[in-house]
Image (spheres, rainbow, N blue to C red):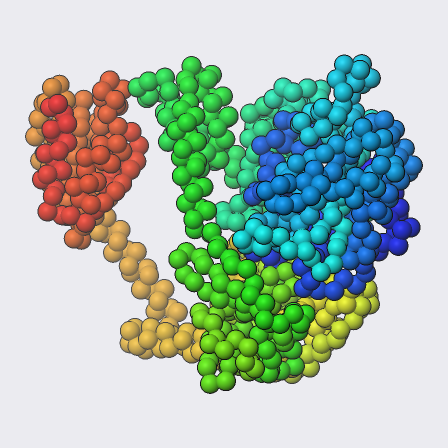
Amino acid sequence: MTASEIRQQFLDFFASKGHQIVPSAPIVIKNDPTLMFTNAGMNQFKDYFLGNRVPPNKRVVDTQKCLRVSGKHNDLEEVGIDTYHHTMFEMLGNWSFGDYFKKEAIAWSWELLTEVYKIPKDKLYVTVFQGDEKENLPKDQEAYDFWKEHIAEDRILLGNKKDNFWEMGDTGPCGPCSEIHVDCRPAAEKNLVDGKTLVNADHPQVIEIWNNVFMQFNRLKDKSLEPLPAQHVDTGMGLERLVRVLQDKTSNYDTDLFMGTIHTTEGLTGKEYAGTDDKKDVAFRVIADHIRAISFTIADGQLPSNTGAGYVIRRILRRAVRYYFSFLDVKKPLLHELVPVLAAQFSHVFPELQQQVDFVKKVVFEEENNFLHTLESGIRRIEDFIQHAATKAVDGKTAFELYDTYGFPYDLTSLIAAENGFSVDEKGFDAAMKEQKDRSRAATELDMGDWVILDETPNSVFVGYEQLESTTKLLKYRTVKAKGKEQFQLVLGQTPFYAESGGQVGDTGTLHFGDEVIHITDTKKENNLTIHFADKLPAQPDAPVKAAVAKDKRHNTERHHSATHLLHAALRQVLGTHVAQKGSLVNADALRFDFSHFAKVTDEELAQIEAIVNEKIRENIPVVIRELPKEEALKLGAMALFGEKYGDTVRVVIIDPAYSVELCGGTHISSTGELGQFKFVSEGAVAAGVRRVEAVTGSKAEAFVNEQLQQLKEIKAALKNPKELVKSIETLIQDKSSLEKQLETLELEKVRALAAVIRHQAENINGVNFLGQVVNVGNAEGLKQLSFQLKNEIPDHVLLFVANVGGKASVALSIDEKLVASKGWEAPKIIKEYIAPLIKGGGGGQKTFATAGGQETDKLDQVIAAVKKLLTA
């Protein structure tokens, strides 16, 4: 069976058991502050388990794209080394929300594995929770008894809390779980060692393939457990492992899920994959795994960057590059060539990658290309270190600098060091790494209290589409501490406050508890829960609440939000239909819109786009909002954003059916005329293949235009109100350029004259011709030219020229190449250690020549004395 057939059989089997097949959620998590990525199949159903939403169907089945590279579930360093860990993987799952429980889940998993997939029963073992006295949790006897109906009792193993009690996080839904393991060893090995002794022992051929989680409890902040109001089933089976078992392979990478990518990589590199544990084959596996994680996250809207989720993707990509650079001897971009192969392979199940294949390929190429240049710089850095090291060891600080600045993992630094007979201070590296992680953790750490429940009514109903004020009640609240600041999060029975989502910022406003006013500073979503942020709690939390949104801020935000829809359509009209939204931010002051496009948007194109948007504003087109079944909305031509999770019923924003139809949950104006006018503020690049425009509307656009006109008026006045302003400015620029050239000529003549005067004033110190002087030059370039004038005339020289340039200290230091080689003197090091501290500044350059600048102009003589002392030592 192919992987596609295996996946489909799973979905069809549970559909026959009354389950609704639902699509995978995006791999990139939105509206959940506890997660960056979907790391388990249950993430998209978290609201159902928490009771924040009612599921449309009590039984569902799916295959979910997952990513595990950070936090509790971090498999990154094992990926490629072994045969069964992955970054991105597919989690097959069947779910019961308060419907069936252990009996059915166990029976159906056994039926599917043994009767549909025909896995021999003597290959399978199951585990159940053995209980935990400390938590006062009993053995899961119920699951044990149900398993006895299907499998021999000696194949039912008891597992501890670590392996057989599943928890969402430090708090939240949890419960015992029952795993299914398969023993794929050959018969001879089975005869030597009993398979039950290898379960959960990290044996590469005795692996877990399915986990049945029985959610029964809710973990509170004080670690206590309370029963959930309804019991749920959450199961997960890794497709990659299942395919390996059914295709009778000893490695996940030998299946058709990965071999297409591996064969393509063989063709691109000229190397062969043998499936061994050597570094070359590890590199093949790393590439085959990592390109999936990279491609699908970019397709779902997460671009590589230096922070947060974007940094995780950049790390994964760089790990793949390092492996092909070091072990496949490939020194040019490779990964982007694999994107079309992957897109075609998954087009029938995850079509979003095929729909954006050119864009994803471009982003991956640019990231690879940039990192390859960084790698070269890092290699030069470590080679330079080795060349000048006093001992045969790379200290931990340098090893961490290579990791942090150049992306070198510890093993790559060790490899290069070993090739040169050096060791690396691993403890020092680990200490530097821990220090950085501790800083990062402290910066983001949240101390979140348990919810204080005042009312068990189902959570917030949003009424803010129709009204900006509402009389309601406080349902629950909790305390949150971050970076030493205490805040409070409040949940209302109904709310007019829009929670930050889809690029639109959260509302602010007030809550009136009788005469007491609580200011709401922000509104966000946590899963599907609307949370209001306040700096204090009401004195009478059970009093009726009047919730009022800040109207002006909301209306200005709505103007900018509706403008993004007009803008999106105009961009596609002018630049092409390849344009797709890649991010946005709309608030009361401005809009920011990111979109896929591979070239700078010209001034002419911007003017054309702006004209189209303003024409639509003048037409005063009604903004029509309808709620429709998703399929019906898509038939209307509604644009859906990649990376967004939509429900069965969607909100469609229509601004002329022939112009703009988009799925959108944000708030909007009633007609385009309310925008007044639209004006671009800026255009630029965000990432490879992604451009960003910023714009303003309404009174903000009016203020921007007035500000520009005022500047123009001031420029005219400064130039004595010329009739032809542009021509006058061009003349002014030409005159300035001419004067600068004259000044440069005069300065050069001055430097030449100065050089002629001082060339014979060099002082011989221990065989070194030292010339150090405070000189009078017009700029720092003069010091550089003076050094260059004299360096070829004075052998074995150290030239140090310092000056007061415009009230700032300026320094130039030149050292003869022979002295750099024989004495080990390097200009940047001397600048850093002896000069920069005196002038309270900094600088750098080449080994033979460096410059510096600083604040202290009264220490210039001391600078010369310090360097002279170094020569006499």
Position of residue 774 measured from the top left corner of the image (x, y, whole percent): 11, 41
Query: Is residue 87 among what the camera can see?
Result: no
Q: Residue at x 72, y 70 (%)?
A: 651
Position of residue 306 measured from the top left corner of the image (x, y, whole percent): 49, 47
Tell me how many marks there are.
0
In the image, 298 versus 270, the foreground residue is 298
Q: Residue at x 48, y 75 (%)?
A: 538
Q: Which residue is drawn at 45% across and 27% down?
A: 379
Quadrant of the image for the C terminus? top left
Residue 547 lies left or right of residue 635; in this view the side is left
In the rendered view, would you say 817 is above or below 851? Answer: above
Q: Which residue is drawn at 69% across and 57% down?
A: 228
In the image, 103 versus 869, the foreground residue is 103
Q: On the image, which quarter does residue 405 sit in?
A: top left
In the image, 684 versus 299, the foreground residue is 299
Position of residue 51 measured from the top left corner of the image (x, y, whole percent): 69, 62
Residue 625 lies left or right of residue 609; in this view the side is right
In the rendered view, would you say 91 is above or below 392? Answer: below
Quadrant of the image for the N terminus? top right
Residue 524 lies left or right of residue 576; in this view the side is left
In the image, 597 versus 737, the foreground residue is 597
Position of residue 724 measured from the top left corner of the image (x, y, whole percent): 38, 74
Query: Is residue 816 among what the camera can see?
Result: yes
In the rendered view, would you say 34 is above or below 610? Answer: above
